[in-house]
Image (tube, rainbow, N blue to C red):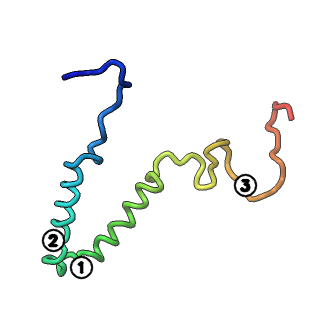
Amino acid sequence: MNHDPSLPDTEPASFWRSRYAIGLIVMGAVAAYFLLSEHRAHFFGALPFLLLLACPLMHVFMHHGHGGHAGGHGYQHHGGEQASNTSAPPQAKTGEQP
C-alpha cells in the first residue's frame, strides 16, 4: 500500500456511506415491499398487538423504568430537592446559616 506522508491522515468512510450499505438498504426495501404485499393480512392482524406492546416499551425506554426515583415524581434532578407547589422561599435547616 502506498502512503503519501504529505497527505493528512483521514479516517475511512463510514459503512453507511459505502456502496455495500446502499445495496443492503435497497435489498431490504425490496424484501419489505414483498413481505408487506404478500403478508398484508398477517401484518394487519398483528397491528393491534404491536400497538399494545408499544405502550410498555415506550414507558421503559422514555421513563427509564421505575427504579432509581429519589423523592417521587416531584424530584428535581439538578438540585436534588423535592419540588414544592408553594412560592415561599426555602427555609434554612436547623444549624445552617441563611
| Kind of element beneath mark 2 | helix
Comparing marks 3 and 1, which lies closer to the viewer? 1
Q: Give the camera-side residue of 39 and 18.
A: 18
Drawn side of residue 91 relative to residue 16, left or right: right
**Callout 1 secondary element:** helix
* Quadrant of the frame with the N terminus: top left
Residue drawn at x 28%, y 47% is 16
| Of callouts 3 and 2, the N-terminal one | 2
Task: Identify residue type, mark 1.
Answer: Phe
Instruction: Residue at 23%, 57% (x, y): give it.
Output: 25
- Which label's residue is closer to the chain start, 3 or 1? 1
> What secondary structure is marked by label 3?
loop
Disc 1 + disc 2, Cβ < 8 Å: no
Q: Residues within 10 Å of mark 3 (few under 14, many from 20)?
A: few
Instruction: Name the residue type under label 2.
Output: Leu
Q: Which mark is residue 44?
A: 1
Q: Residues within 10 Å of mark 1 (few under 14, many from 20)?
A: few
Q: Is residue 61 above or below residue 98?
A: below
Residue 35, numbered circle: 2
**Label 3, on which residue?**
84
Residue 20 picture location, percent across and down: 19, 48
Distance in Å between CA atoms under marks 3 and 1: 47 Å
Q: Earlier in the sequence, mark 1 or mark 2?
A: 2
